[in-house]
């Protein structure tokens, strides 16, 4: 029960990894408010700056505090720069970078006033080691990794720890939809991907959620600005 009496806000809570994060935090005693585009406790579009700016205070008011912010929502834009539209750029930077920027900016004063807190951002192995053919996604994940390192340093003195999880491939709708768009059978494609991972399989959402929970918990009490790769031993190829 590492999160007894803790209040947490989780973005992208309906997604593959988001659902596992919410389940883990609740299983260990946290009060969790979920946010997503639809059917969440706090429904809204992370591309709406005013929604993001107001969300931490709204969550704190509803729960009676805000100890933990999990910036998990994200989208992937595939393809080389020459295939990327203005809209791809706007949406990727808006959801993957600007939204967590706004949420951190609004949550930090609330946490500071209460004596501290923990923020876990979601980067990617690709945000740390760029892979091929996804420059828009990778640039956005590098930006959130950099923001995490900056905030981890700048706000440690307020008792606020900011860290990021950097997964490699995870078995969620995000990765499965990529195969489906290319006309591939997702189950068969994932079997092939499993064979490329030294541990023998790509990650399940719970493999990532457990690391997010660790970073959000007091077990990680001395970690600030860390980018934690969770990759089953597979380097970015
Ligand atoms: N799946 C992977 O292989 C993988 C690898 C590395 C990093 N990640 C990162 O992990 C995080 C979670 O990914 P996932 O695989 O669970 O993806 P997912 O697509 O299953 O879930 C993403 C969630 O974000 C929400 N979201 C997207 N745009 C939104 C918007 N404008 N407003 C509000 N909510 C919005 C979606 O509704 C969805 O519930 C993402 O940041 C992703 O980049 C995933």
Image (cartoon, helix red, strand yellow):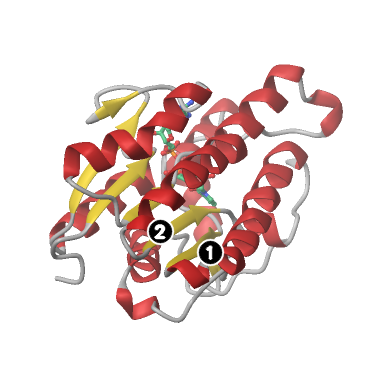
**In the picture, residue 54 is in which quadrant?**
top left
Label 2, on which residue?
112
The answer to whether one can see residue 171 in this image is no
Drawn side of residue 235 relative to residue 131, left or right? left
**In the picture, residue 94 is in which quadrant?**
top right
Q: Give the residue at x 27% y 51%.
A: 8
Say which label, 1 or 2, has the lower sequence index. Answer: 2
Say which element carries label 1: loop
Q: Give the residue at x 36% y 40%.
A: 56
**Which x, y percent locates residue 21?**
30, 53
The answer to whether one can see residue 54 in this image is yes
Q: Give the residue at x 27% y 38%.
A: 59
**Which x, y percent locates residue 110?**
37, 49
Q: Give the residue at x 54% y 69%.
A: 228
Query: Disc 1 and disc 2: Cα gap in Å?
Result: 9 Å
Label 1, on which residue?
155
Compared to residue 3, the image places residue 40 above or below, namely above
For the residues labelled 1 and 2, say whether their Cβ atoms are less than 8 Å apart.
yes
Image quadrant where one finds the C terminus? bottom right
């Amino acid at each position: 029960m590492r999160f007894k009496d803790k209040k947490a806000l989780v973005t992208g809570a309906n997604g593959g990894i988001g659902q596992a994060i919410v389940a883990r935090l609740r299983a260990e005693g946290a009060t969790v408010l979920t946010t997503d585009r639809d059917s969440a406790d706090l429904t809204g579009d992370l591309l709406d700056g005013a929604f993001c700016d107001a969300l931490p205070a709204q969550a704190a008011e509803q729960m009676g505090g805000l100890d933990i912010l999990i910036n998990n929502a994200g989208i992937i834009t595939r393809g080389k720069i020459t295939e990327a539209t203005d809209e791809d750029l706007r949406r990727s930077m808006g959801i993957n970078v600007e939204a967590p920027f706004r949420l951190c900016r609004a949550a930090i004063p609330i946490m500071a006033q209460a004596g501290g807190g923990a923020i876990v951002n979601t980067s990617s192995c690709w945000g740390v080691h760029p892979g091929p053919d996804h420059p828009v996604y990778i640039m956005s994940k590098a930006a959130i990794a950099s923001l995490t390192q900056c905030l981890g340093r700048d706000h440690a003195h307020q008792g606020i720890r900011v860290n990021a999880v950097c997964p490699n491939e995870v078995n969620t709708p995000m990765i499965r939809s990529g195969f489906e768009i290319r006309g591939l059978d997702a189950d068969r494609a994932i079997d092939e991907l499993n064979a490329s991972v030294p541990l023998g399989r790509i990650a399940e959402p719970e493999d990532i959620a457990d690391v997010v929970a660790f970073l959000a918990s007091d077990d990680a009490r001395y970690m600030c600005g860390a980018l934690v790769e969770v990759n089953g031993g597979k380097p970015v190829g």
